[in-house]
Amino acid sequence: MSISRIENSIGAKLRAERKRLGLSQQALAELCGVTARSQRNYESGERLPDAAYLAALAAAGVDVGHVLHGQHPQAATVAAPADLEQAQAQAGAWYSTHIQHCARSGEWKSGALAGCLKAHGLPWQASAWPSGTAQDDARNAGFQAAYAWARHDLDSQGGAA
């Protein structure tokens, strides 16, 4: 799947979730800590949201696994940490520093985002993607790599989530 198709697919799911929640673009933007323009860009597929936005979206009750992958989780999500805001900020910073600009596929990065969220104790898609296609394998590889990397970083800093 091309990056532009991923961006448009995520945008359409974001718009559907926003409407399901009965929120305007402005209201969801404020809830997730972004500008209304950023929210429009995410929904139109012009830009992909970052980890901090997706973590805030999950905290607002949106199934981020569905938004990113089109699948609803088949298992329970990880319990959110006591200091959700701090964990969201840490996850967003870690993802931005280590993953966002790396030369990997969109599928790998979407898996890495889920791994980053899990490592920081935030809601994420609990079930692995089925194996068999290159895209699924890339998402699984991204998840495993980012989860192990982020856990290592957190453990070495004494910041267990």
Image: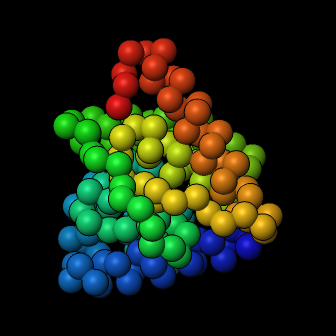
Q: Quadrant of the C terminus?
A: top left
Residue 70: % across, % down: 53, 75
Does 91 sit above or below residue 58? above
Q: What scheme was used to colour the molecule?
A: rainbow
Q: Quadrant of the N terminus?
A: bottom right
Q: Residue at x 44, y 44 (%)?
A: 118
Does 145 sit above or below residue 64? above
Residue 77: % across, % down: 36, 55
> Could one spot residue 43 in this view of the protein?
no
For the residue pair 149 and 78, the one nearer the viewer reads as 78
For the residue pair 155 and 86, the one nearer the viewer reads as 155
Residue 102: % across, % down: 69, 43
In which quadrant of the rendered view does residue 158 lie? top left
Q: Residue at x 36, y 40 (%)?
A: 121
In which quadrant of the rendered view does residue 133 lie? bottom right
Counting every numbered tag in the picture gives: 0
Q: Left or right: 49 with respect to 133?
A: left
Residue 93: % across, % down: 44, 36
Q: Left or right: 63 with respect to 2?
A: left
